[in-house]
Image (cartoon, rainbow, N blue to C red):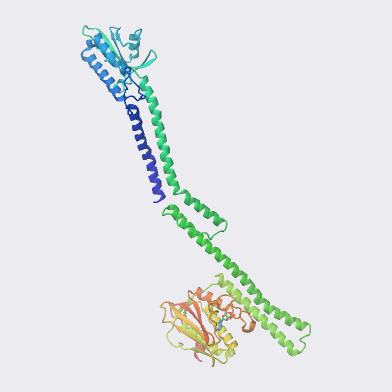
Amino acid sequence: MSIRKKLILSYIGMILIPFLLFIATSFLLVTFFFKDAFGPHTHTIWGRNAAGETQQFPGYMSERNKWLDGITLFAEYDPDKLADPAFLQHADQSLQPLDSALAVVRGGRLLFASAALPAEGLAANLESSTAQAGPDGSSQEKGPNGWGGPQLAIGGHSYSVERQPLAFADGSQGAVYFLTDTGRTVRFFRTLVPLLLLALLLAIALTNGLLTALVSRSIIPPLRELKRAAERIKEGELGHELKPGKRDEIGELSDAFEDMRRRLQESVRLQLQYEDNRKELFSSISHDLKTPITAITACAEAMRDGIASAPGMQIKYIDMIHKKAGDMDRLIDELFLFSKLDLHRLPFHFEPVDLRAFLRDCAEDLRLNPQNGGVRVVFAEADGPPVMADADREKLQRVVTNIVDNSLKFMEAGSGAAGAKEIRFTLDAAGNAGQVTVGVRDNGPGIKPEALPHIFERFYREDAARTPGTGGSGLGLAIVKRIVEEHGGRVWAESVPGSGTSIYFTLNRSSGPVREEGGANEAGADH
Ligand code: ADP
């Protein structure tokens, strides 16, 4: 259940449950006080009447009201009955256990007063206390059953006074006063009301306490767990997995937190890896720059110390210095290019390029280069309709050059397949509908299977000793990979040690216009 639902339900509970509890408690309290629920001799708060009987509140009230109604009736229809001493005596006796009393005034003089009332000055007292009488002479301010009548203090008791005017048969006027001692009732309510209030407070406190404990049990512990997890992350402890929470808002928060922790962990791992790579990069650069510098220094020292005094030797040393300086220059160029590619700072200008014509040009350039004598360059798919791809022509040239340079370099250095050295270009436009695959295959020494997955890594060279025999910075294929990826393609290698290497890369097909290829194409066509 969601926390929102739980809170709504607990709010409803906090209103409803105390209300129901209060009603139930009130019912019990009232039952306990109003009724003698525990047997006839139990002394209830209402106590026993003068006759020693246990009184019950409802009986007491209805009895008293009966008398009040009866006297009112007599006052209206048979006022002379209220001048009958026998009747008044009987009424007085019946009213005593009900804490009520009667007084009758006739012609301004007290005709009858209950024994509980002091006769002296009573008529005047009663008259003045009910002076606010209405035009009919009856008490104006009447509560239910006359309980709220004017109050009169007599002989240490507080009475509620009800007045009914009397018009006797002989023409004299008077009034009958019905007095109720409110002391006992007030005491009763004084005890009951605080108890009821206490019950209400207890009901509210109990319900709130229980519901708060219930709701907070589903909120506080998972929040504490989250806090602990946050503290662990603050301390850099990212490996502690947060268990999936309940299906509520905090559960969702835990899931999001766990997701964040995993990403953070991954990013820290990458950060550390980058840091390692950076250190490795520095050491590789230092190594690759140090080697030619050491050679140049050695040659220069040899010449300065006159070791290479023979003119032939001097030329040899100068050639060596020139070659090493060239190596360094190339390395710095490649490093510069690679770093720009790595930082995505090299602008690319894509245009539709006819790959068939482009590869035809590359093949022709290779054939025309006198340094490549003895290398057979084959492009079987040279003829056919244009195969258009979106590419940056200059960068694409760089890709092909780097791959071909490797083929030439390693075919020269290693023992490949028997027969003539061969570089074969392939173009496959039939495979993937949206892409074209270009391949450069040689029949050089090949690459060992364990080295194959690493050849596109920067500074990776299968020759672990980094001996300068095959030259190279180890950046050539890393540059190829970055350029191809910027084109939205991928690059991979296949190789069989001893029989050759194939490097393939894909480019996105272009829907752009077919462009006529430049002069190089025409030059190549002649060969
Ligand atoms: P390098 O400057 O060393 O050539 P590259 O990134 O171009 O660096 O190539 C990485 C490594 O891949 C090379 O050192 C070599 O071991 C291997 N390699 C690449 N092309 C070939 C190939 N045509 N034949 C054999 N090995 C190759």
In percent of width and height, residue 384 lies at 43, 87
Across and down, in percent, residue 219 comes to: 45, 49
Whether residue 363 sits left or right of residue 205 in the image: it is right
- Above or below, 79 relative to 294: above
Work out whether residue 210 or residue 289 is closer to the camera in this orientation and state it. Answer: 210
Q: In this rendering, does residue 362 appear at all?
A: no
Q: Which residue is drawn at 57% across and 68% down?
A: 273
Where 106 falls versus 217 (above or below)?
above
Q: Is residue 491 left or right of 13 when viewed as pictured?
A: right
Give the total number of marks visible in the rendering: 0
Which residue is at the front of the view, 505 or 33?
33
Give the residue drawn at x 54%, y 72%.
Answer: 347
Whether residue 32 is visible: yes
Query: Quadrant location of ligand 1?
Result: bottom right
**Residue occupying image coordinates x 72% and y 87%:** 315
Q: Where is residue 367 in the image (x, y as percent from the top left)?
A: 54, 90
Q: Please determine whether, in this image, residue 276 is positioned above or below residue 202.
A: below
Q: Where is residue 401 in the image (x, y as percent from the top left)?
A: 55, 82
Q: Position of 314 compared to 61: left or right?
A: right
| Quarter-of-image position of residue 73 | top left
Q: Return the residue nearer the eye: 392 or 162.
A: 162
